[in-house]
Amino acid sequence: MLYEWIGDSNFATGMHNYLKRFSYSAASTEDLWTELEAAANLPVTKVMKDWTGRMGFPIIEAEIEEQTEDSVTIKLSQSKFSTIAKSAEISDEPWNVPIEILSSAGKMNILIDQKINKVKIEKFKSENGWIMINSGAAGFFHTKYSADLTNRLMKNLENLKTVDRLKLSSDLYCLCRAGVEPSDKYLKLFQAYSAETEYSVLSDILDGIETFKSFADYLQVGPKLDSIIISTISSCAGKIGWAAQECDTHTTPLLRALLLRHLGLAKHQETVKHAQLKFSDFKSKPESLDPNLKSTVFAICAANSNSIADFLELHAGYDLQEEKDRIEVSIGSVKKTELIEKVIDFAFGGSVRHGDIPHTLTCLARGSREGRIAVWNIIQKKIDFLKEKLGGQFLLSGLLKSVLSGFDDENQIKEIEKFFKENPVSNASMAIKQGSFTKKNFLTKNSLGLENIQIRSNWIKRDGDLIKEFLK
């Protein structure tokens, strides 16, 4: 953020002067700010005092204040961002925030230092005009756009840089999670990304859609969301196809695997049939399957299979641990209850190394609500075994984090707290302690265990009907 604000030349000059001046003496952080401030002739010390001396970061709300034929005035309001706390419960002192604004009228850089700031953009044509706050994503804050500004951006996604499209979806997910934005807004943005072809952007927004898939299953509208996923990404998947091409970039194999996997897990029949054909050919001729698509094909076939016998046979026949690992992870995509139980039996049956058991269980827990419940049940039954084999590593705490954070029923919290009180796990104590939810907690996207259950429970209570109505 600092580098982008003061510019490359000023940053280089300031760093040079700082290193030269203090080359044989002690220096403080403030000395660095002083040199950078002198080089850039900007209030670096005042700005950086906010960002290094305070906890948290702001949310900037943007809306159109006034509009004429050739200009627009936008209002930027700032407050401290929190996942759960209400605005009245947290400090609301404004930050000094450098912001790059990109619009249909061009680029401008500003510094805001008040709770409410007004910025005028000249040569802005109202029709088809758009405004992107924090272009380049250098600023460490979330942006909430008014409905009007959001619609303008969604209609002009092709004019935004890749990092801006990524930032737009990332911000909106975090704001929906915190209850600042309605969840249907994220689903509408996802649909607007139907022409997207960048792996980083699609990977991020599909990661968010995974949360909504869990909610949709809970609300019994899962097939409706699957239909939206298919209609949104099938065009891009169709263009890149199954086979590698000479025109592929370094991210195309990643994008191909990502899209085909999501289509297959959404039960897109053409994709499922093609994956099953690939798998059938692979069993007799292993070299026929692109190595970059092995995990994708295996996961799709496992999710749409009535048996895991083929996977177990492959696993037993492999000598390379890498190939065994791929099977152990992929079969975690099974959906049917009887197959989930068989995968759990396989994980604990001696064929899987103790250190790899969490990988299989984690995939099962993420794959479906039934899988998550089954994994939680086996963790309770096998907790002594897991502590003995994995207790000295971070694998057990990672497994607990992955499984617990997928639940979204707050009634589960007391059950989980009671279990770990009776069966403490020493190297996961922090994850369990953070489950003691209070309104004073300030949580982030990476919150662990029970905190995440409470957040997801609140999310469904708040937006469940809205999600269900949108999908219907």
Image (tube, rainbow, N blue to C red):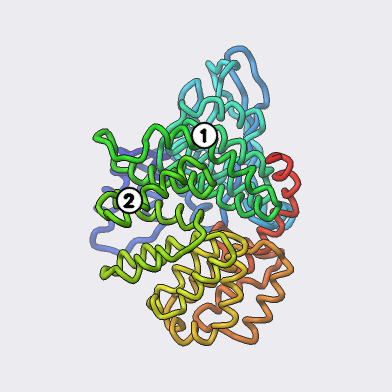
Instruction: Say left or right for 116 vs 366.
Output: right
Question: As displayed, is residue 218 above or below residue 364?
Answer: above
One can see residue 138 in this view: no
Q: Which mark is residue 281?
A: 2
How far across and down, in percent of the image, does residue 458 sit?
71, 57
Look at 75% across and 54% down and name the residue there.
Answer: 461
Amino acid type of disc 1?
Answer: Tyr
The residue identified by callout 1 is 193
Look at 68% across and 81% down and name the residue there.
Answer: 418
**Within the image, what quadrant is residue 451 found in?**
bottom right
Query: Callout 2: helix, strand or loop?
Result: helix
How far across and down, in percent of the image, does residue 182 sit?
69, 43
> How much space separates mark 2 and mark 1, taking CA atoms?
34 Å
Disc 2 versus disc 1: nearer the observer: 2
Question: As displayed, is residue 471 above or below residue 72?
Answer: below
Of 265 and 7, nearer the camera is 265
Instruction: Say left or right for 395 vs 247.
Output: right
How far across and down, in percent of the image, does residue 315 sit?
35, 68
Quadrant (top left, top right, bottom left, bottom right) of the N terminus: top left
Quadrant (top left, top right, bottom left, bottom right) of the C terminus: top right
Q: Which mark is residue 268?
A: none
Mark 2 neighbour class, 10 Å CA radius: few under 14, some 14 to 19, many 20 or more:
some
Query: Callout 1: helix, strand or loop?
Result: helix
